[in-house]
Amino acid sequence: MTDTSAPADADTRRAVAPVICYPNDRLPVPKTEQYQTARATAQQTAHTQVPPRQARCFYVTAGSFFRISCPDGAQVGDLNLFAARNLEERFFSGKTRALHGSHVKQGDRLWSCLPYLRPMATITEDSLAWYGVDEFGGRVHDVIGTRCDPYTHHMLSGQDYHNTCHSNLTRALADELHLSLSEAEAHIHDVLNVFMCTGFTRDSGQYFMKASPARAGDYIEFFAEIDLLGVLSACPGGDCGAEHSSDAAQCHPLDVTVFAPKAGQLDGWYAPSNNRYSRRHAPE
């Protein structure tokens, strides 16, 4: 029988200092000052409003900025990103989390999946930067949640519910690219939970959510490092302060606004290339 009791040196083992897996001071540094200069004269070129409990697609050209905002009040958004001309290259929430932490902030980047592994977008502004970390360990803009989905909802309740973020994203991508729902669903991936306030409970380590601190007018803004296709769902949980998938929660729209800088503002900047690993997957 396995002995599960604590060893004599249990406290010593627990006291071992952690090591950061991926020191992010070695990452390529975004050209923050150039981005700020370019943004100062950028002009709006596109606008998309995402209705409550629905999703919409939008496009952003490399070198442009896009802002996601709450025009009417606190509203969580679930964001998928793709390379505009290659659905196989998509946002990699797990690697973004490993490189930057459980929640992203100004200066952090959203990274694409393997084998591409390059910056897709850089966070340049965040009106909720003031929130920091609350007494429960809650932070905003998480890359730990997976998106609400009808499969988990059915498993927990025994009921079909179609206005989950997973279903919203699937429908929006299918409509935009003229795909079947099953074809589109295969491309939907784990999200950036924009404006969502989340963390892990200290006792059980369970994922928790609490009401988003966002107010009408709050926003997060990104610089597009490559040409992007975005899909954004206005979560049916509203501010996610009570329910994750619901027809009862108060929900608001989300706005996506794209801004293009003036010619010459990004001279010397280049979109990042794909990861340069040889892909041999074997020692020489």
Image: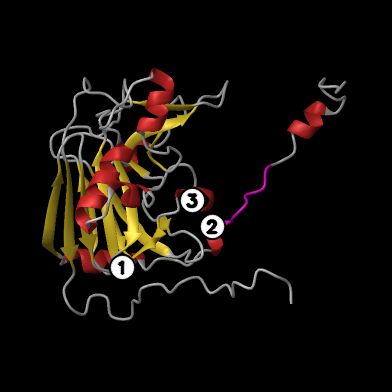
Query: Label 1 belongs to which residue?
Result: 85
Colour scheme: secondary structure
| Circle 2 SS class | helix
Marks 2 and 1 sit apart, C-alpha to C-alpha, by 29 Å
Q: Quadrant of the N terminus?
A: top right
Q: Is 191 in front, or is 195?
A: 191
Q: Is 51 in front, or is 47?
A: 51
Q: Which residues are magenta?
A: 18-23
Q: Tell me which amino acid carries mark 2.
A: Asn
* Label number found at residue 238: none
Residue 172 relative to residue 89: left or right? left
Q: Is residue 127 visible?
A: no
Q: Is 119 in front, or is 190?
A: 190
Closest to the camera, between mark 3 and mark 1, is 1
Q: Is residue 87 magenta?
A: no
Query: Label 2 belongs to which residue?
Result: 24
Counting from the top left corner in percent of width and height, residue 251 is at: 19, 29
First of labels 2, 1 by sequence position: 2
